[in-house]
Amino acid sequence: MYRFRKIFSYIVTFFLIANIYINVFIDAKASELVYPYEEWDIETTGSAKYLDGSTVFVCIFLNDISATWTVSEKKRVMDNMDIACDYLTFQGNIYGKKVNLIYDFTKDSGLCYDFNYRRTFPGNCSASSDDDVYELYEAIRAFIYEDIPSIEIMDRYDVDSIAYLVFIDGESDNAAAYSYYCNYSSYYEEFALIPLRWTSGYEVNPDTYAHEILHLFGARDLYTTQERNGITKDFVKYVAREYPQDIMLGYATDGVSWEDHISSDISKITAYFLGWNGYIYELEEYPSIEVEYRASFTYKINPSGNYIDYTLKGRKTDEKTYMANILEIVCCIGILIYFVLSIIKNVKNITHKSIDENIVYTDEKNPDDYHGFN
């Protein structure tokens, strides 16, 4: 009996210690990784709260096995960040919002991290289109959880809003933002992937930085249909017609991409998604765009409307093709007219020559004196 009691006490002690370890260490670590602040699990936004007040950006420079960031390249990123954040602050002032963005890693090295990715960047920033990009996406998530002291950074700047900007020393045909959907996502840390250059070889300009940052605060893409966000084909066409300068039109905006400033603006449509406007009259005609919570994403299930694949990029390409075809037709008509006129001219010359040959002259020395035709 004594031996049984001793064994039983050992078993109970073991389970008590195991329970304490799970509750104190494992659960605490999981809480730290998923929820830097406990209230995040009940918030409708992700880690980037509202573009009204203070937010701190952590800049992550991704080095893969084929490319490593240089000092001059990081300086270019900082220059673009300066322009993009000044633009966002100015646009916020227009709507009466005080936007304070903290990001200068040249003054605080704690806002800058190097992430050594042991694979080659897949050349695409959209995880939905490529398994390799999804692996990169998961690696970035793990890096943010394990290597960035988010709580310490937020406490140091006395903010409750933080976002992560991942810069890629490579080429891509797109940039991407990974925002939190309050009824769908399990990750609260919001980040954007921004390449140094496009696949065309041109450097990514500040307007792309601002565009992707705005996604983290609730802004929707306005250049393409998106069923999960209620962006219909008719709404895309409407925005392009009524608000052609909106920065969320991306490459379809009527503005021009510059290296030293941003020429587009934030229309009242994007201001609504950011929570800067409480109501816009477009909600009456396009109810599918209505947000459930301010400055946040909610995955919409079977919203009404036409969501056939449609992008303004395709529309503009079609317009260019159409104009090229029109120009080709005009050129062909012009060439045809030229040949017709040339033929008419040659016929006239032949006719005049024939008439001259059939004139009967009375005096070979005086051909101007003639009396008629044969």
Image: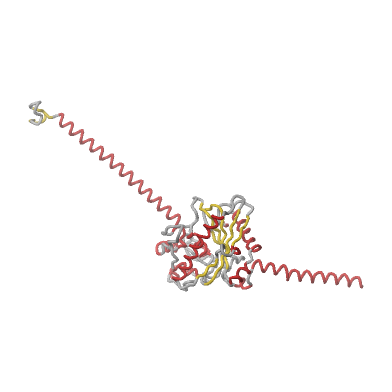
Closer to the camera, 247 or 289?
Answer: 247
- Side (left or right) of 221 relative to 15: left
Q: How many marks?
A: 0
The outermost residue toward the front is: 107
Is residue 83 positioned above or below 350 on the image? Answer: below
Look at the image and tell me whether residue 260 can be seen: yes
State the colouring used for the structure image: secondary structure
- Side (left or right) of 86 relative to 7: left
What is the x, y in percent for residue 308? 48, 59
What is the x, y in percent for residue 205? 48, 57
Closer to the camera, 197 or 78?
Answer: 78
Q: Quadrant of the C terminus?
A: top left
Q: Quadrant of the N terminus?
A: bottom right
Look at the image and tell me whether residue 178 can be seen: no
Instruction: Find residue 124 and report its image quarter.
Output: bottom right
What is the x, y in percent for residue 145? 64, 64
Closer to the camera, 359 or 195?
Answer: 195
Is residue 342 positioned above or below 196 on the image? Answer: above
Residue at left offset 25%, top offset 40%: 341
What is the x, y in percent for residue 264? 43, 62
Residue at left offset 64%, top offset 60%: 143
